[in-house]
Amino acid sequence: MQALDIDVQDRIVRLVKNILEQNSLEADVQPAARLVDIGLTSMDMVNLMLGVEAEFDFTIPQGEITPENFQSVETLQRMVLGQLRPVRAA
């Protein structure tokens, strides 16, 4: 995994852990774990979305705010990396 990939993943894990701590929950946040299974509610997902936008300093496009992109740290990481990396010409 590249340095940017690891940095993005670590920052998302930290955001998820902070939200869990605010709810007095503790969980081993693994990249592939479903966020709802480790204790995040729908309101937590909204907070996570806002946290991701603040952490990475971009607005998530409406089309990217999908349940699929917010299933796990891995799916969030792919979405964030897609926003951070410039689109390459085919």
Image (cartoon, rainbow, N blue to C red):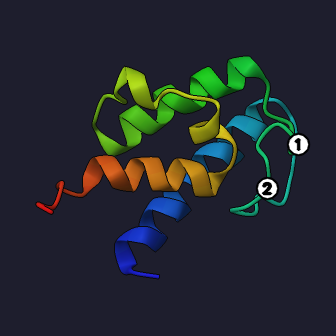
Query: Which disc, if any, is residue 21?
Result: none
Q: Quadrant of the rendered structure where residue 48 is?
A: top right
Report helix, strand or loop for mark 1. loop
Label 2, secondary structure: give it.
loop
- Residue at 73% in and 61% down: 32
Q: Residue furthest left?
A: 89
Whether the residues at callouts 1 and 2 have beta carbons within 8 Å, the answer is yes
Q: Which mark is residue 33?
A: 2
Residue located 52% across and 29% down the image: 49
Q: Amino acid at mark 2?
A: Ala
Query: Residue 30 location in percent, x, y?
Result: 75, 63
Left or right of 83 in this view: 75:
right
Crowdedness of circle 2 by 10 Å Cα count: few (<14), some, many (20+)?
Answer: some
Picture layout, residue 68 above or below residue 77: above
Q: Residue at x 58, y 51 (%)?
A: 75
Q: Is residue 56 left or right of residue 43?
A: left
Q: Is residue 53 above or below residue 71?
A: above
Residue type at tag 1: Asp
Q: Residues within 10 Å of mark 1 (few under 14, many from 20)?
A: few
Tag on residue 37?
1
Which quadrant of the figure contains the C terminus? bottom left
31 up-or-down from 45: above or below: below
Residue 59 figure quarter: top left
Instruction: Give the x, y percent position of residue 19.
Output: 69, 35
Q: Nearer the viewer, residue 64 or 19?
A: 64
- Residue 13 shows up from this direction: no
